[in-house]
């Protein structure tokens, strides 16, 4: 996600908190190293509502998770940096870490993204 007012990027992290008794709840974290304008923030809220607002058995809440600097990694040579970064964020919000993955797992992810985008 790129903010409308700068060329900087902010990201969303969705943490599914499935509960047997109370249904589904999703914690959403807006990850950014800068402050979004009111307009960009409203766009993020609208995006979340478009994705999750029509799901009656699912509630959601968004919080801001500030980071020191924008995530940068050596694409495509160190794809496991993505897992390390996300695991650090999940630890900060006290959520379960990702399952172990390998560089090969990212091959399948990029294929899925290509077919989704085109």
Image (cartoon, rainbow, N blue to C red):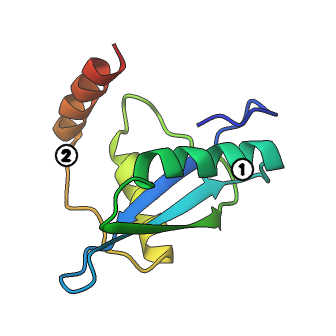
Q: In this view, does 14 lie to the left or right of 49?
A: left
Q: Quadrant of residue 53?
A: bottom left
In what element is the residue under mark 2?
loop
- Provide residue 110's location: percent of width, then percent of height: 28, 27
- Provide residue 102's location: percent of width, then percent of height: 19, 46
Residue under label 1? 41
Front tag of 2 and 1: 1
In what element is the residue under mark 1?
helix
Instruction: Work out how far the residue at label 2 is from the one at label 1, CA to CA, in angstroms.
Output: 34 Å
Q: Residue drawn at (34%, 66%), measured in percent from left and top?
A: 58
Compare residues 60 and 69 and report the one nearer the observer.
Answer: 60
Q: Is residue 16 above or below residue 112?
A: below
State the quadrant of the N terminus. top right
How packed mark 2 is, by other alpha carbons closer than 10 Å (few <14, some 14-19, many 20 or more), is few
- Provide residue 52's location: percent of width, then percent of height: 42, 54
Q: Is residue 51 left or right of residue 10?
A: left
Mark nearer the N terminus (2 vs 1): 1
In the orientation shown, which residue stands out farthest toward the bottom?
Answer: 21
- Provide residue 15's location: percent of width, then percent of height: 38, 65
Q: Residue drawn at (77%, 49%), measured in percent from left and top?
A: 36
Residue under label 2? 102
State the quadrant of the C terminus. top left
Q: Is any atom of residue 13 visible in this view?
A: yes
Compare residues 114 and 39 and report the one nearer the observer.
Answer: 39
């Amino acid at each position: 996600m790129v903010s409308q007012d700068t060329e900087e990027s902010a990201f969303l992290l969705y943490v599914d908190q499935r509960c047997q008794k109370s249904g589904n709840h999703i914690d959403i974290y807006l990850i950014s190293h800068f402050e979004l304008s009111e307009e960009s923030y409203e766009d993020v809220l609208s995006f979340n509502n478009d994705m999750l607002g029509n799901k009656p058995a699912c509630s959601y809440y968004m919080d801001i998770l500030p980071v020191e600097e924008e995530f940068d990694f050596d694409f495509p040579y160190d794809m496991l940096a993505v897992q390390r970064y996300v695991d650090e964020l999940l630890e900060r919000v006290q959520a379960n870490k990702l399952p172990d993955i390998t560089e090969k797992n990212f091959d399948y992810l990029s294929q899925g993204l290509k077919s989704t985008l085109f």
